[in-house]
Image (cartoon, grey):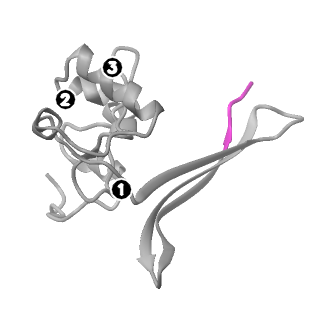
Amino acid sequence: LGYTAKNFLLDDIEELTLVKGFGKEVLSGDKDHPPLSPHITAFGKGGLNVNTVSEQTLYLLGLSQADVTYILNARKDEGIRVLTQNLLTAGLNRTSTDTFRIEALAILKTRSSLGYNIVSVVRRIPYKGGYKTEILYWKENEYYTGS
């Protein structure tokens, strides 16, 4: 293969592109396939949060239209606090999250083709009766769309 396998947790999902046969197009998508990157993370503690998982992921887990509709409607109110066996069996084993992905995009007002993007992943950690925030990932980049 030309490299030694890391054999450890991923630091970033882009490390998946180092796996033979797993190209960047799998993460970013192409004309025939949607991107995988919005549905996976290298920073979670395992499991899926029923109150934040995407609708597409709910269907990928094999949930019925009725189950997906129930989950999406329950989120509009108080969210789901108790997990039924049906949800647990599908892999939805969390009702809260302490890890968050934040993306900020700035576009230069006078030239909409220029911008700056910041993506971060932070974790909220209990600390002295409150919380503190740990930065797990930070990436900044300028971009030019050419328009």
Q: State the mark number for residue 41.
A: none
The residue that disc 2 covers is 61
Residue shown at the point (17%, 56%) measured from the top left? 2
Q: CA distance from mark 3 to mark 1?
A: 32 Å
Quarter in which the C terminus is drawn: top right
Q: Secondary structure at mark 1?
A: loop
Name the spot of residue 36 as percent of width and height, x first.
Answer: 33, 33
Q: Tell me the crowding category of disc 3: few under 14, some 14 to 19, or many 20 or more residues within 10 angstroms, Cα based.
A: few
Q: Secondary structure at mark 2?
A: loop
Count how many numbered circles sit on residues in the image: 3
Q: What secondary structure do most residues of the magenta stretch adopt?
A: loop
Residue shown at the point (43%, 40%) measured from the top left? 78
Q: First in sequence: mark 3 or mark 1?
A: 1
The residue that disc 3 covers is 69
Residue furthest right as drawn: 110
User: Range of the magenta residues?
Assistant: 143-147
Q: CA distance from mark 3 to mark 2?
A: 14 Å
Residue furthest bottom as drawn: 128
Amino acid type at circle 3 is Thr
Name the spot of residue 56 as percent of width and height, x first.
Answer: 33, 25
Amino acid type at circle 1 is Asp
Of tags 3 and 1, the one toward the viewer is: 3
Amino acid type at circle 2 is Leu
The residue that disc 1 covers is 12
Q: First in sequence: mark 1 or mark 2?
A: 1
Q: CA distance from mark 1 to mark 2?
A: 23 Å
Of tags 1 and 2, the one toward the viewer is: 2
The image shows residue 117, relative to residue 25, as above or below, that is: below
The image shows residue 67, relative to residue 103, as above or below, that is: above
Of tags 3 and 2, the one toward the viewer is: 3
